[in-house]
């Protein structure tokens, strides 16, 4: 007996809830093939397919399904559903770097939520709009090689708008008693203040984020907070305190078996010990970073590790080792076509 | 570049970590549970 559209979709929903987005989207695709005349069911299937592809980082497909969902929700006059589809479309457009379109979609989600008296939707839309301006500000900063805080006025304006939306979101989720959402707002407020150069404020928000992460036993959020705290403390010149947080980041990355983050923590520790002029320790962490980068076949990371090791060995007066790593850095830069790296290595 | 300024530059450009996006969900289970409840209560 063939499975019905609904049976297939329910299995897709179960798999996605369990985190198996690949399996889940396959069942939803099969459900679409079988088809249904219940347009509300079809809208939910499109929405979940869009989300599944979003988490699989297949953003083109995510965009396609969230668009289908939006059209369908409008056709059946489902205003809340239209708001949700707009919010999801906004998040997807944001990831694709289409910030102006993303802001329009997220604003529509906000308007509909307010019109329907849906406070939860309103809070989520405010957070999503904050995310759009936050990502846009980051992109404007990209390549400008400026320190946090030293910002052109348009970037400052964008980041201040992000901050304003996060603050509105925070005030509403506090009213709703949603602690998990407060954690997310605190974390991103910490990040916008960091970019705006308000490091003391950034630390205050990241500490709040850390506290909520611990309250929920959310180890990934706890690790993020430690890493962000370390980054902000560097700018206050508190290098010893920064190493403490980076160590905790490292410990949690290992616990979570997240090698990319483990490598990042080693790299940050290596650089912080360089700032503390503790070159032996710096070398220790840069070597750990190098090993993980090799394991992950991350040639960019490997090049960075070699560059940092070369510098640390120069500081220790070990010119033989310094030359060894400088040569490796040069070879990797050539191989990956990193012209800047190649020029730096030649110096 | 001396190692100090190189380390500062690297830490300056370090990526900070954003909180995750929140996607809206349209749950089929919730939808059908609600329909079932409505039928039981004789609602249209």
Image (tube, helix red, strand yellow):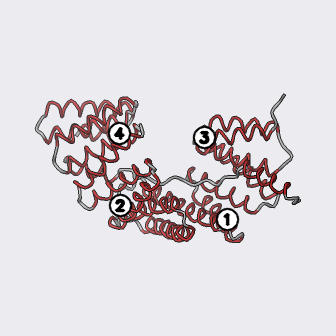
In this rendering, the label closer to the viewer, 2 or 3: 3
Residue B1 screen position, x and y as percent: 21, 47
Q: Chain of mark 1?
A: A
In the rendered structure, find residue A18 and report the number of the disc placed on it.
3
In this rendering, the label closer to the viewer, 4 or 1: 4
> In the image as oriented, which residue stretches furthest toward the front?
B40
In this rendering, the label closer to the viewer, 1 or 3: 3
Query: Are dots 1 and 2 in contact, CB under 8 Å?
Result: no
In this rendering, the label closer to the viewer, 3 or 4: 3
Q: Quadrant of the C terminus of chain A?
A: top left
Q: Are the residues under marks 1 and 3 on the same chain? A: yes
- Pointer 1 residue: A108
Q: Secondary structure at mark 2?
A: loop
- Pointer 2 residue: A148
Q: Nearer the viewer, residue A24 or B9?
A: A24
Residue A197 screen position, x and y as percent: 35, 65
Q: Secondary structure at mark 4?
A: helix
């Amino acid at each position: 007996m063939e499975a019905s559209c609904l049976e297939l979709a329910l299995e897709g929903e179960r798999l996605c809830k369990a985190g198996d987005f690949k399996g889940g989207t396959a069942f939803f695709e099969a459900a679409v093939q079988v088809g249904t005349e219940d347009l509300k069911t079809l809208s939910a299937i499109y929405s979940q397919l869009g989300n599944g592809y979003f988490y699989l980082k297949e953003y083109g497909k995510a965009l396609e399904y969230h668009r289908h969902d939006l059209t369908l929700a409008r056709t059946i006059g489902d205003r809340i559903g239209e708001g949700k589809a707009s919010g999801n479309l906004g998040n997807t457009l944001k990831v694709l770097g289409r910030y102006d379109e993303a802001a329009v979609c997220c604003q529509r989600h906000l308007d509909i939520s307010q019109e329907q008296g849906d406070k939860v939707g309103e809070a989520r839309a405010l957070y999503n709009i904050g995310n759009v301006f936050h990502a846009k500000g980051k992109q404007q900063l990209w390549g400008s090689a400026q320190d946090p805080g030293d910002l052109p006025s348009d970037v400052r304006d964008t980041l201040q708008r992000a901050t304003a939306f996060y603050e509105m979101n925070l005030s509403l989720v506090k009213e709703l008693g949603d602690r998990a959402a407060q954690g997310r707002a605190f974390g991103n407020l910490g990040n916008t203040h960091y970019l705006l150069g308000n490091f003391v404020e950034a630390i205050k928000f990241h500490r709040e984020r850390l506290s909520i992460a611990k309250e929920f036993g959310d180890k990934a959020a706890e690790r993020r907070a430690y890493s962000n705290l370390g980054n902000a403390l560097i700018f206050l010149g508190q290098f010893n305190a920064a190493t403490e947080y980076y160590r905790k980041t490292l410990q949690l990355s290992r616990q979570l078996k997240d090698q990319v983050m483990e490598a990042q923590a080693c790299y940050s520790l290596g650089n912080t010990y360089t700032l503390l002029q503790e070159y032996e320790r710096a070398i220790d962490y840069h070597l750990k970073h190098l090993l993980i980068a090799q394991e992950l076949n991350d040639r960019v990371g490997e090049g960075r590790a070699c560059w940092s090791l070369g510098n640390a060995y120069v500081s220790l007066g070990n010119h033989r080792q310094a030359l060894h790593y400088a040569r490796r850095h040069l070879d990797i830069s050539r191989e990956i076509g990193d012209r800047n790296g190649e020029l730096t290595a030649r110096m | 570049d001396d190692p100090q300024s190189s380390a500062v530059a690297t830490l300056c450009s370090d990526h900070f970590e954003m909180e995750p996006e929140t996607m809206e969900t349209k749950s089929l289970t919730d939808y059908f549970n609600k329909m079932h409840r409505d039928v039981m209560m004789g609602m249209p």
